[in-house]
Image (cartoon, helix red, strand yellow):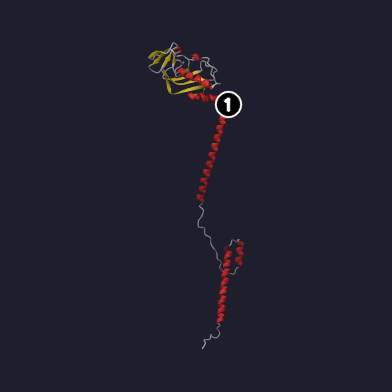
Amino acid sequence: MEEQNPPGINQGFFRRLNNTAKRNDLKLELASDSLKNVLTKEIKFKDLNERLLKSRQEKVLVREVVLESEIEFVNSLKQLKSIFKEELKTAIDKVNDLYTSELLKLQKIYKSEVIGDALLEIVKTISKSGWILLMKDSGVYAYKFYSPVFEVYEGYTEKGTVKEYEEPVCKIKGIYVNILHPKITYGSILLATEGGHHPNVDKINFGTACIGTFEDRDIPLDNPQELLGLLNEIQACYEVIHLDSCYYTPTINFTSRKEEQWKVA
């Protein structure tokens, strides 16, 4: 005998009901996904508020966005400050270099215009033999500085007698030649000494030299090479004693010899 369904229960009804429920679940799921898509989009607060008021749902999915890291403002400011200092220093150094370069150019132009190229050429030429230009009082001097000092041991006469003293008569510290004088005259040549009195100088330590045969010699500022030759002659002249034109006679012991070829300047 076939088994019959209980009265009042229809299996087809349950199948239809189950299928309906599944369809409704699917619709709800699709609706939920659609709502998620809407909520995950960027919308204005006004629009969101209106949608929430129209919604009949009691629950709303809200996603919270959490920053995993934050900007360290203090450290960032310190780094920016350090970078700014470095860039500023670089800029300042560059400006200073340009300023120094331009200043040197201006100084060179100034010297050429005010002092003159001829005087600059004199400085360049005489410096080769250790002479420099020196502004002193109201004169412009070609100055020979001795380091160490030059010890004067020998004296000469016009007759060719050479006296070699056992001790230095004096020590020359420097020779001054006033190149503002057109010709060599009394006061053109000065000597600075120590440890004694140079016999050809009027005063001890610092005084005016006896010019001897240099008198009326031209001081050729228009020819640096000739000027250097004159200065070197003056240097060689006072590194010895000219006994025929002394302000005093040294009393130091000496030995003498003859030197016929000696010629007083």
1 left or right, relative to 249: right
96 left or right, relative to 254: right
Between residue 189 and residue 228, name the one nearer to us.
Answer: 228
152 left or right, relative to 24: left
At x 49%, y 14%, the residue is 213
Between residue 156 and residue 65, name the one nearer to us.
Answer: 156
Residue underneath mark 1: 114
Q: Position of residue 28 (x, y in %)?
A: 57, 71
Q: Position of residue 64 (x, y in %)?
A: 53, 62
Q: In the structure shown, which secondary structural element does the residue marked by tag 1 occupy?
A: helix
At x 56%, y 26%, the residue is 117
Q: What residue type is labelled 1?
A: Val
Say whether residue 190 is visible: no
Between residue 157 and residue 6, name the one nearer to us.
Answer: 157
Q: Where is residue 16 in the image (x, y as percent from the top left)?
A: 57, 78
Q: Where is residue 130 in the image (x, y as percent from the top left)?
A: 48, 24
Residue positioned most to the top: 159
